[in-house]
Amino acid sequence: MTTPATTVYVIDDNESVRRSFARLFRSENLLVETFSSPEEFFDYPRPEDNACIIADVRMSGSTGFDLAQRLASDGIQTPLIIISPSDDAQTREYARELGAVAFFRKPVDDQALL
């Protein structure tokens, strides 16, 4: 029995960030789906079991924190990685409280993220 490929869901309102992450993960033979907003993500079928979500904190409209709250309320336990242009203790702590498994400051170190 083969293990299904890992899918990475990238949610960021910046198209160049989405493209950059998509290239990075595809170069590692991972499946990638990109979304410009949490709303667009939630219109998509539920995440695969073998998946993770990477979301920006600061987006126009809903934020990465809004996404985390919705994931929790919908019972979706897909690991969430938060990325943010700012790196302060309060933002990191709030991300952890909302269930994020990791937090990275933009620009993200590709090797650290992988």
Image (cartoon, rainbow, N blue to C red):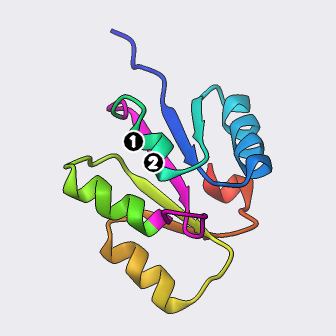
Determine whether, in the image, residue 49 is placed left or right of residue 14: left
Residue drawn where x is 71% and y is 68% of the image: 106
Is residue 63 highlighted in magenta? yes
> The residue under label 1 is which amino acid type?
Phe
Question: Which residue is found at the position 53% from the left and 56% from the top?
Answer: 55
Q: Residue at label 2?
A: 39
* Residue type beneath disc 2: Glu
Looking at the image, is 29 positioned above or below residue 104?
above
Q: Position of residue 41 (x, y in %)?
A: 46, 42
Q: Which residues are magenta?
A: 47-64
Residue at the location (33% across, 9% down)?
Answer: 1
- Is 86 placed above or below 32 here? below
Q: Nearer the viewer, residue 81 or 57?
A: 57
Residue at the spot of label 1:
42
Front residue of 109 and 60: 60
The overriding secondary structure of the stretch rendered in magenta is loop
Residue 38 falls left or right of residue 21:
left
In 3D space, how far apart are the residues under numbered discs 1 and 2 (Cα atoms)? Answer: 5 Å
In this rendering, would 78 be left or right of 14? left
Q: Residue at x 80, y 48 (%)?
A: 16
CB-based contact (under 8 Å), mark 1 and mark 2: yes
| Badge 1: residue crowd in 10 Å (few <14, some 14–19, many ≥20) | some
Q: Which residue lies most toward the bottom here?
A: 89
